[in-house]
Image (tube, rainbow, N blue to C red):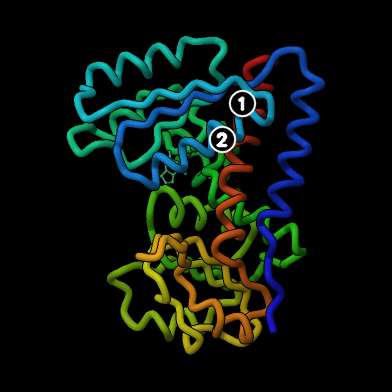
């Protein structure tokens, strides 16, 4: 029976640590979050980022827009936030409304305030083995979970299912930095099961419930579930068939309570680190 990785616990230690550091500092970190999308999940994510920022004593700036927002107005806002000394981190919640150019907006954010680590300069630094200004939150959180449970990464075969810019690609770079042997699988991968069966660390970031079934997992593998799909009954469901896989895996993350809390914890840590860097 695999050990259940408690993301909530590791995240709350990180929150406590940040709260104390902020209480001791004269100035406060500032996080700006931009929501230009009416997706209900995005609204919930943004509300929880705002709530956590305030709980930790950060300055929180949230900009919510309806569909009438234009590219011009959004560009103007990003320029203002880049200039605003009280704002240390800028997060543009993705996806944006369809008429907005996501990549152009990401590239306008000052890379030193790019708290998501999505700017090509930060992605490039990551892939060069350099320190980006900020590392993407979900991948960073996954590495913290593995380290928090003393799970060896070096020399292990890590299979990442999903190649998104938000999770799959940056996670592959971070795992490589930790000296794992990394394979990225995606929707066009042939015989996914044969590949996942060879994984010592299997990470799924697809967003389709039960795409990872028990027959796809090697005995003793570490299984990390990044998927979150809201079911018709409003319950959240991961990518992994948790009940069956937990008896095969050595460690497994639940949904909710696994990777999710770490994403927001790393966002708060990134904001704090950018704040320190900008006040050097
Ligand atoms: N949408 C889903 N995950 C994320 C994330 O980590 N950052 C941003 N900006 N948008 C997202």
Say what secondary structure mark 2 lies in.
Answer: loop
Which residue is under mark 2? 134
Specify whether residue 150 is in view: yes
Q: How many marks?
A: 2
| Horizontal and vertical percent position of residue 65 | 31, 26
Q: Residue furthest front?
A: 233
Q: Is residue 3 left or right of residue 261?
A: right
Quadrant placement of the C terminus = top right
* Residue at horizontal 44 percent and vertical 57 percent from the top: 168
Report the image quarter containing ligand 1: top left
118 versus 222 height, above or below? above
For the point 30% across and 36% down, the residue is 37
Q: Quarter of the image for the N terminus: give it.
A: bottom right
Q: Residues within 10 Å of mark 1 (few under 14, many from 20)?
A: many
Front residue of this view, candidates 101 and 181: 101
Residue 117 placed where, x, y %?
49, 37
Question: Are there few (<14), some (14-19), or many (20+) residues within 10 Å of tag 2?
Answer: many
Instruction: Give the image quarter of residue 7.
Output: bottom right
Q: Which residue is mark 1?
A: 274
């Amino acid at each position: 029976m695999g050990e259940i990785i408690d993301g909530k616990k590791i995240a709350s230690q990180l929150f406590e640590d940040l709260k104390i550091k902020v209480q001791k500092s004269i100035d406060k970190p500032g996080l700006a979050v931009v929501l230009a999308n009416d997706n209900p999940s995005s609204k919930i994510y943004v509300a929880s980022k705002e709530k956590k920022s305030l709980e930790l004593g950060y300055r929180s700036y949230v900009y919510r827009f309806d569909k009438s927002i234009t590219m011009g107005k959004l560009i103007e806002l990003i320029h203002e936030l880049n200039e605003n000394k009280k704002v240390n981190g800028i997060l543009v919640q993705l996806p944006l409304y369809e008429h907005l150019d996501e990549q152009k907006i990401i590239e306008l954010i000052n890379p030193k305030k790019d708290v998501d680590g999505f700017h090509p300069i930060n992605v490039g630094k990551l892939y060069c083995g350099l320190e980006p200004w900020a590392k993407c939150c979900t991948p960073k959180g996954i590495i913290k979970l593995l380290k928090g449970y003393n799970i060896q990464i070096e020399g292990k075969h890590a299979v990442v299912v999903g190649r998104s810019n938000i999770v799959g690609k940056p996670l592959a770079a971070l795992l490589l930095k930790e000296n794992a042997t990394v394979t990225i699988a995606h929707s066009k991968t042939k015989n996914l099961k044969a590949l996942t069966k060879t994984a010592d660390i299997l990470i799924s970031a697809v967003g389709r419930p039960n795409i990872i079934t028990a027959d796809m997992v090697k005995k003793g593998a570490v299984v990390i579930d990044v998927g979150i799909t809201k079911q018709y009954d409003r319950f959240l469901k991961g990518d992994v068939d948790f009940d069956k896989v937990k008896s095969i895996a050595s460690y497994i993350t639940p949904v909710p309570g696994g990777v999710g809390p770490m994403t927001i914890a790393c966002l708060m840590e990134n904001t704090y680190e950018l704040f320190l860097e900008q006040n050097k």
